[in-house]
Image: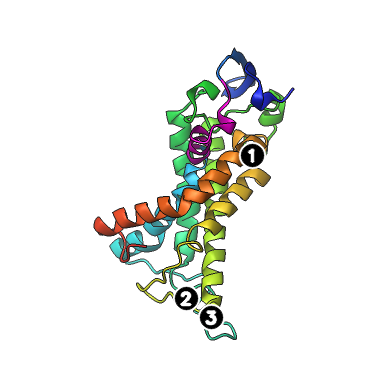
Amino acid sequence: MNQSKSAFSMVFCVRKFNDGPHLLWSMTSVEPPWDDPILAPLVVLWLYLPGYLSNTAAMLGGKWIPELTGISVYPIDAGRRLSDGNRILGDGKTWNGFIGGTIGGGVLCIITHLVSKGNEISSAPFIDPLGNYNSSASEIGDAWFYFGGDVLASFLIGCVLGFGCMFGDSIGSFVKRRLGHKREGELSSKAPILDTIPFAVSTFLFGYIFLSPAVVSSSDLFFGMGILLLVTPLIHRSFNLLGFHLGLKSVPY
């Protein structure tokens, strides 16, 4: 029987207690949200929020902190250019921002875990990112990211999502440079698709590939991911406009 379509679904959540991971099993008559065109993308957005907001953390590490403290900024491409005469990535991609975005994703996942701690499917979209719905307690307890307690596990999950976001964002910048879109200093090129879809797809892939058996790696999220990808450029544009009007960004895109 397809668990995601069952009216009565078994919900598995693993918590880390003093004597190790335990399996909390409950039966719920709530219809799973995976096929709901409204709720499904909201679930994905909540679970992947640490990755989606890592760009903001990258700005903190790559722009705001250096401006406030005077510390040096280190472009990832070190100013190098390819045979087309354009920079590999440009001034907008720095090690400061990459590391800041990755760590920021970890911190954000701690927050989402604490806000939704213990929440099951019935609480969608605010599902605990440490929840597990398709595997046994021993499987999630043995996962590479699950040691040192819930907080550290949440941090590591968020770091993976943040790293995925930074990796995808760098790919988008690489493609933009090859297409002749320039990014030098405070001047940024406007490319809404390349500014959004690569980081979103990369974040999803990193979660799916590296975070099994956590709920973020569930294939049940694919439908919601597809819908969220369609609206990601609009979400990204909205946040950029807000940041521009608040003086946090030099350009509204």
Specify the amino acid type for callout 2: His
Magenta stretch containing residue 39, yes or no? yes
Q: Quadrant of the N terminus?
A: top right
Q: Secondary structure at mark 3?
A: loop
As drawn, the label of residue 80 is 3
Q: Secondary structure at mark 1?
A: helix
Magenta stretch containing residue 230, yes or no? no
Q: Front-most of 136 and 208?
A: 208
Q: How many marks?
A: 3
Q: Is residue 165 left or right of residue 55?
A: right
Residue identifier under label 1: 217
Q: Is residue 159 above or below residue 84?
A: above
Furthest residue in direction right, as rendered? 1
Residue 106 is situated, as x and y percent measured from the top left of the image, at 49, 44
Residue identifier under label 2: 181
Give the residue drawn at x 45%, y 60%: 97
Q: Is residue 208 left or right of residue 165?
A: right
Residue 156, picture quadrant = top right
Give the residue drawn at x 46%, y 70%: 74
Tell me which segment is drawn in magenta. 31-46
Label 2 and label 1: CA atoms lie apart by 34 Å
Q: Say which label, 3 or 1, has the lower sequence index.
A: 3
Q: Is residue 95 left or right of residue 184?
A: right
The reply to whether discs 3 and 2 touch (Cβ–Cβ < 8 Å) is no
Label 3 and label 2: CA atoms lie apart by 16 Å
Q: Secondary structure at mark 2?
A: loop
